[in-house]
Image: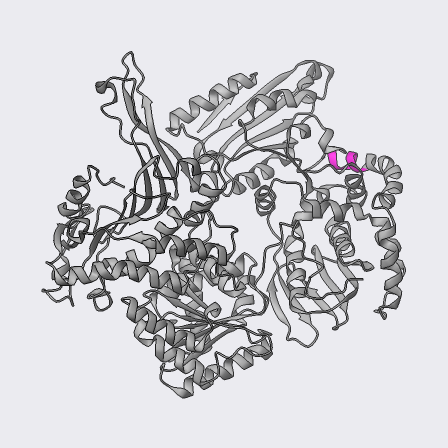
Amino acid sequence: MSTVDGANPLRDAADRRLPRIAGPSGLVIFGVTGDLSRKKLMPAVYDLANRGLLPPGFSLVGFARREWQDEDFAQEVHDAVKQHARTPFREEVWQQLIQGMRFVQGDFDSDEAFEQLKDTIQELDKAQGTGGNFAFYLSVPPKFFPLVVQQLKKHGLADQKNGSWRRAVIEKPFGHDLASAKELNEVVHEVFPPEAVFRIDHYLGKETVQNILALRFANTLFEPIWNRSYVDHVQITMAEDIGIGGRAGYYDGIGAARDVIQNHLLQLLALTAMEEPASFDADALAAEKTKVLGAVRLPKDLAKSTVRGQYAAGWQGGAKAVGYLQEEGIDPQSKTDTYAAVKLEIDNRRWAGVPFYLRTGKRLGRRVTEIAVVFQRAPHSPFDHTSTEELGRNAIVIRVQPDEGVTVRFGSKVPGTQMEIRDVSMDFAYGESFTESSPEAYERLILDVLLGDSNLFPRVEEVELSWKILDPIERYWDEHGKPAQYESGTWGPVEADEMLARDGRSWRRP
Amino acid sequence: MKTDLTDTTSSKINKALVLGRRAIGTPAVGMVLTLVIVTDEENAYDALKAANEASREHPSRTLVVIKRVSRSPRDRANTRLDAEVRLGADAGSGETVVLRLYGEVVDQAQSVVLPLLLPDAPVVVWWPVNAPTDPANDPLGALAQRRVTDTYAAEQPIEELTARADTYTPGDTDLSWTRITPWRSMLAAALDQVHCTVTSADVEGEEFNPSVELLAMWLAERLKVPVRRSRSAGPGLTSVRLETSAGPIVLDRPDGSLATLSIEGQPHRAVALKRRETSELIAEELRRLDPDDTYAAALRFGLERLDEEAATVAPAPVDPAPDVTAADAAPAESPEEPSAEPGKKAPAKKAPAKKAAAK
């Protein structure tokens, strides 16, 4: 006889075929008519259902101003899924999902709409058995965060009763400096306890980013050389080939450093540089990430170790592109950075003296995100100078996107009678060794929210530490000079190249 | 690209693979395993198609071993190996070699396959039909970490299942077991939601479907309660009913696609539970290559013991009291005991099964 006190007799750690399915729950998306929701969230929900990872009765509630009925909403989700979902469309999966789809129309300040949302949730608990467990996904501009969160509180939607849970999911930006980040955290934490707040940094949901930990800590090959004795420097790059598009209102005044370095790049830095966590659970990971972010130091001379730029008119990939200052809706005097490069140091035994160069920008050569760990040259070479002329430094490059994988660069003899050594690449590509269907970052993250698994979400401390790193740089930029101009479609301003040249190094062409 | 080799050897095939890769310009290979499919000409096409689809998830070198039937003494004396090397778009995301064996070499297939295995990568052998009685001791099976059979394709699946239990070696697995993963996952999820004590279970499905037996044995093994089986018109599994202290939990799938989950005190919910394609089953099988202990435990539970314990309760739901005795008695028995007896009968019953399946 199986007496069940929490333990499910059908679950067994050794039974690795059984996936972890989220418990009874629903997802409420605010700003459901937005781009993110249509292109990423709805398809992710469908893909999860298709992989059998959503609980029976899973419910999806859309909240937006648009005058839709439930059917219109379902149609919208249907179109979004057909267009953007990763897995093939299957009617029976759709039938399962559609039963729990609701739409609530209203403004964020409308009490009536939130009361209706409350009724909808109660109705779903009855009809779909969601058990009062709901996650609220705030896919709305940051200025609405406080309003929506307060409304949730006011209407009792954030109350966790009788063992049910309510969770809040928020997207970047988490403030625009330390002070505003703290303010935002206070607003959110006043309503939701810290463990119920999930900050989405979609980079952390990517397979390649999770693989950094596997690469470093599951192997013996890399960790022994992962320190100042062998590593010369580290370059972390996130380049986009597009401009700001229609996001002028959001982007101007924020800039590349706040938009990308503060969250994505510093998270990548933390994963690359942190010590081995005691275990792979959320607390242990957060502890190590917090430790290494706390050890990050800015160089003394910010003029020589930071560069910001703005894209100027030019040609990007065969298409004519206007400069940032000429974009519609941008103040021609704007000092907002569309390119930012900074040099950081980590003050600990492992990394003392190893610079970490972080750069990001819009309208660069191509869209790419990668982490390059560049090693020191061999201390002595038995080969004469001419034979190693073309030999660069050894490097391990983790390609985060696109074409996910890992490249190792090392020297090899060129076939022939002469001794000539040249760089070659040894390549591991995800698409080659694993599935062509790795789950999308949002799939993983939404599932983790429903499971309450916070491994892949940055915590308050990490967000605040990141702002502490970036704030002095932003302050310095505000007071000194203006962004350098770089031609669209190139790899950034010459000042950035000079910055590395001063250290006797150069940027990789990713 | 495709290369045909007639009357060839493994080393010539290896050469053709290297030349072919060079010709299409992809010398680097990221293949993660070698999949050996042992089949007859009749089933080769479908099996290869499924494997190629699965190779999108698991890039692999696929070796299809086709044993040709020799119909005359002259044919039997005439030993020959033909191969068809497929690379690039013709071979999913890996490379495929179709091997046709004639004459004496039919019994020496491992000598052809061994030189063609990828270095250092796991080997999986899959018999879509006509699996050997003892896969681990089959010359080809012995090369593999994982041996995949399919009792569903056998003429007498139930006897076949008993035979599998007798010869089980870690690394064995069966597609009938793979087929029920979504069911098992949904039942486990249902028990996650209700805190209760299961007192008995019913599994209903079409006749001659070993998945019904495997699911019943898994439930009996995990829950330690009597599990009854009943027949329906199918397709496949149609319903599972758990009697619990919190009322019945029923997962019902009449149409092979959309199921309904009913839990006492909760609304009925639709669940997508589609019967899956062979390619999806193979892809799941290749995901983990370590021994499946849960399968072993379910398989070894034994059909006789399942029947014995089911007989201890009346078909109608009963109060938990009689179950206590049944369950208490269960752990006292050695796990091998129930399967020992059918083991003796197995060879006799196996013969017609094999003959029929070979047709």
Q: Position of residue B219 (x, y in %)?
A: 75, 56
| Residue A495 drawn above or below residue A433 | below
Q: Can residue A80 be seen?
A: no
Q: Position of residue A329 (x, y in %)?
A: 16, 68
The region drawn magenta spans B353-358
Q: Can residue B270 be seen?
A: yes
Q: Quadrant of the N terminus of chain A?
A: bottom right
Q: Please name the residue shown 86% across and 54% down the image.
A: B330
Residue B161, located in which quarter of the rendered image?
A: top right
State whether the magenta stretch is mostly helix, strand or loop: helix
Question: Which residue is most to the top?
Answer: A417
Residue B354 inside the magenta-drawn segment: yes
Q: Position of residue A247 (x, y in %)?
A: 24, 65
Residue A7 inside the magenta-drawn segment: no
Left/right placement of residue B14 relative to residue B314 reads left
Residue B231, located in which quarter of the rendered image?
A: bottom right
Left/right placement of residue A32 relative to residue B284 reads left
